[in-house]
Image (cartoon, helix red, strand yellow):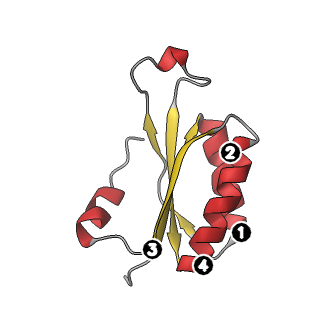
Amino acid sequence: MAQQAVGYLEVYGCVAALVAADAAAKAGNVTIDPLDKNKPAKADDLPVPLIMCLKIRGPVADVQSALEAADAAAKSITGVVTKHFNPSADPETEKMLKISAI
C-alpha cells in the first residue's frame, strides 16, 4: 500500500463520529479506518462521556478537505476534542493505526 496522508479527529460520542465519518467520505477520495473509542477519566464531566477517534486516509488534499468537513459536522452535533493532519505517517505509526478498541 502506498503511503497516504492521515487525518485524526476525536469527537464526543458515537453519533458525532458517524456523522463526521459520513461528511469526510463525501468530501474527498478517502477511506475511513475502523473507529476507536475511549472513555476518559472523569468522563461524567464531559458533554458526552465517550470519545471516538476517526482516522481518515487518502491523498493529502483529499484528507485535508475530508478532515475539515468532518470537523464541521462533529461540531454541529456534540463537539470536537482535537484534530490533527499527518501528511505521511511513519511506518511505526502505521502499525498503531490498525489498533481499534471497538
Residue wearing tag 1? 27
Question: Residue most toward the right?
Answer: 76
Label 1 sits on a secondary structure element that is helix
- The residue pinned by badge 3 equals 87
Label located before the other in sequence (2 or 4): 4
Snapshot quadrant of residue 46: top right
- At a point 62% along the width and 23% down the height, the residue shown is 47
Q: Residue furthest bottom?
A: 2
Q: CA distance from mark 2 to mark 4?
A: 20 Å
Q: Answer whether residue 4 is visible to the viewer in this image.
A: yes
Reading the chain from its start, which is encountered first: label 2 or label 1? 1
Q: Position of residue 92 (x, y in %)?
A: 23, 66
Which comes before the other along the chain, label 3 or label 2? Answer: 2
> What residue type is disc 4 on?
Ala
**For the residue labelled by badge 3, is the local secondary structure a helix, a strand or a loop?**
loop
Q: Residues within 10 Å of mark 3 (few under 14, many from 20)?
A: some
Name the N-terminal-most of marks 1 and 3.
1
Q: Mark 4 — residue?
A: 61
Alpha carbons under labels 2 and 1: distance apart: 14 Å
Residue 10 seen: no
Q: Residues within 10 Å of mark 4 (few under 14, many from 20)?
A: some
- Residue pointed to by mark 2: 74
Q: Amino acid at mark 2?
A: Ala
Decide which of tag 4 and tag 3 comes sooner along the chain. Answer: 4
Figure check: 68 above or below 101: below
